[in-house]
Amino acid sequence: MLRSAARLSRQFPTSSRTVVSRSISSTLSFKSKVLETSPSVRPSVMTATINGHGSDYTPFLLSPVPGAELRDGVPAVDESDWTSELDLSTATEFSRAALRDRKLKVLVLYGSLRERSYSRLMAYEAARILHHMGCDVRVFDPKGLPVKDDVQHDHPKVQELRGLSLWSDAQFWSSPEQHGNITAVMKNQIDWIPLSTGSVRPTQGRTLAFAQINGGSQSFNTVNTLRILGRWMRMFVIPNQSSLPLAWKSFTPAGRLMPSSNRDRLVDVCEELVKTSAILLPHSDLLNDRFSEREEKRIKGKLLTQAEKEKEKDAEKEKERVALAAAAAAAHEAHAATPSPS
């Protein structure tokens, strides 16, 4: 590992070498254990698929690409994979040194059900870039996920999504912009991931990156909304972001991004996600340690779910109501026992 750190130091310019050295030294000296979180979902085929890394989670490695246009009835295929030719050594070496050769686990979500969905194609490109940086990448297919309600928590697709979220160290979200904001398909996935399930926070402490896909001119409404949602879910949202304009002109018939500054920006975002995750993940126990949660555990013995908190509030209100009623009854009795003036 020290040799990896030394190689990494040589790759950086002198002006930034001190920062890199401090990051690596801090990572190597920190004694906090990096948790290997396994999905706490109900036993099912979905659980086995997640733990067994089912092939359904890596469609970005298929050729032809799902969503490729047909040419004479045959899906189009590009001759080469541009992501395999990228120089990603800086982020890759830093991640290996910081995580001690542990693979970064990244969940990718996209917000469309169309066959040739540009948000899905964008998600696949991000997945390939992350894969080439040594990440364990899994893409969730939102098809079949029910509309959010308070009934279908045991639905296989809901359990699958929640299990993948718990499994992940980092996430990448790719959403189209529709009517000036994220799509219902994207929001539905996020809504099915609870902020808390008892003492488990399915997204707290995970790093997040995202991309927005536009049918027309470039906009930033969707990435702004995704940034708000990520912060609300207690995730570390990276500063960088990607917004792709004129998506229908940006992909080859085979479903691959054509060369452009926007394609380069996607690479920037993926590199930043890996670097940020590598810096933060070894300190996840420290960063997720909150005073308010420690106090709740000390007083209540555990972290309460929202339902339990509401039940407590209702019990307190009922207690207060009974006390007021008792006080009113006592006052009435005292008034009745008082002799009236003659």
Image: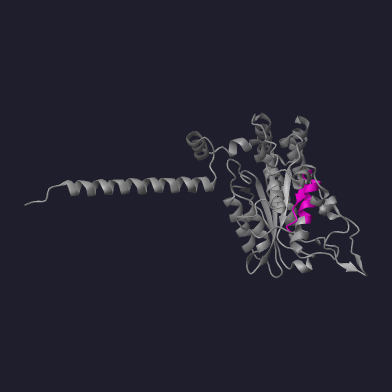
Of residue 166 and residue 328, the one placed in the foreground of this image is 328
Nearer the observer, 132 or 62 = 62
Tell whether position 252 is magenta.
no
Q: Is residue 119 left or right of residue 309?
A: right
Closest to the observer: 224 or 318?
Answer: 318
Q: Position of residue 111 (x, y in %)?
A: 70, 60
Q: Is residue 243 left or right of residue 321?
A: right
Instruction: State the image coordinates of residue 233 (x, y, percent, origin top left).
Output: 59, 50
At which x and y percent is residue 305? Answer: 55, 45
- Identify the residue shown where x is 72% and y is 56%: 265
Q: Is residue 84 above or below residue 36?
A: below
Q: In this figure, which colouring scheme has been used for the structure?
A: one colour
In the image, the segment drawn in magenta is: 124-142
**In the picture, which quadrant includes the N terminus?**
top right
**Vertical comparison of 294 with 168: above or below:** above
Q: How many marks?
A: 0
Q: Extreme left residue here?
A: 342
Quarter location, residue 2: top right
Between 42 and 177, the one lying in front of the other is 42
**Residue 126 within the segment the image draws in magenta:** yes
From the top left corner, tell me how far across and down residue 312 is, in percent: 46, 45
